Amino acid sequence: MRIRTTTAAIAAVLAFAVVGCSSDSDSTGDSGSKADTTTSSAAEASSSADASGAAKDTGLPPEPTGAERDAVLAAVMDVNSKLIQDEDKAIDAARNQCAALDGGAANTDHTAAQRFSYDGITLTDDDGSHINIALRKTLCPAS
């Protein structure tokens, strides 16, 4: 009972602190929501522009959608069907592997095997080679 009371008191104090820190009112009593919305929208646009610029700088290809996404997932599935149980994780690994392939990384077969070895799945360098071949045919063709 004592732990519950203490936990409830701490939660109440934290909630009060968060609400107290986030309130932003000017002298007229308005919260300035229009200004906050405009600032927030501008910040989000800048952030997404920065993210796309950062992705280009690191060599990450854009996230595939539609048929291209399906082709990448099918190529990865050909190596090991368990790799696409978490499709987003497989796509992220594929995009990162493309950056390694296009960036001139050494031993890309081993890198691919390590990058796609997750959720209890362990790949060999030969599997990594097959992933690299598949990625070159789908997501990141050689320039």
Image (tube, helix red, strand yellow):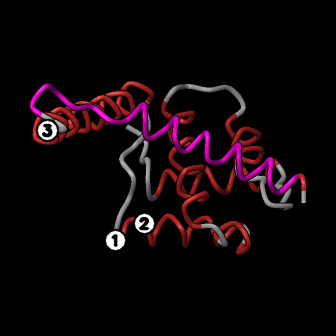
Q: Is residue 41 magenta?
A: no
The residue identified by callout 1 is 66
In the drawing, does residue 29 fall left or right of residue 129? left
Residue density around tag 3, few if under 14, some if 14–19, many if 20 or more, within 10 Å? few
Q: Residues within 10 Å of mark 2 (few under 14, many from 20)?
A: some
User: In front here: 27 or 32?
Assistant: 27
- In this rendered view, identify the residue nearer to me: 97 or 92: 92
**Which residue is denoted by mark 3 in the rendering?**
30
Q: Which residues are magenta?
A: 3-28
Q: Which badge, 3 or 2, comes first in the chain's sequence? A: 3
- Which residue is located at x 67 percent, y 72 percent? 85
Residue under numbered circle 2: 69
Query: What amino acid is at disc 1?
Result: Gly
Viewer-nearest of discs 1 and 3: 3
When the figure is inspected, residue 92 is found, relative to residue 57, above or below; the finding is below
What amino acid is labelled 2 in the image?
Arg
Task: Identify the element where label 2 is drawn.
Answer: helix
The quadrant of the picture occupied by the C terminus is top left
Q: Is residue 97 left or right of residue 35?
A: right
C-beta proximity under 8 Å, tags 1 and 2: yes
- The CA distance from mark 1 to mark 3 is 45 Å
Q: Which residue corresponds to the image point at 48% horizontal and 33% vertical from the top-left?
A: 102
Who comes first in sequence, dot 1 or dot 3?
A: 3
Residue 18 lies left or right of residue 63; in this view the side is: right
Residue 101 place in picture, x, y as percent: 55, 36
Name the main secondary structure of what is drawn in magenta: helix
Amino acid marked by disc 3? Asp
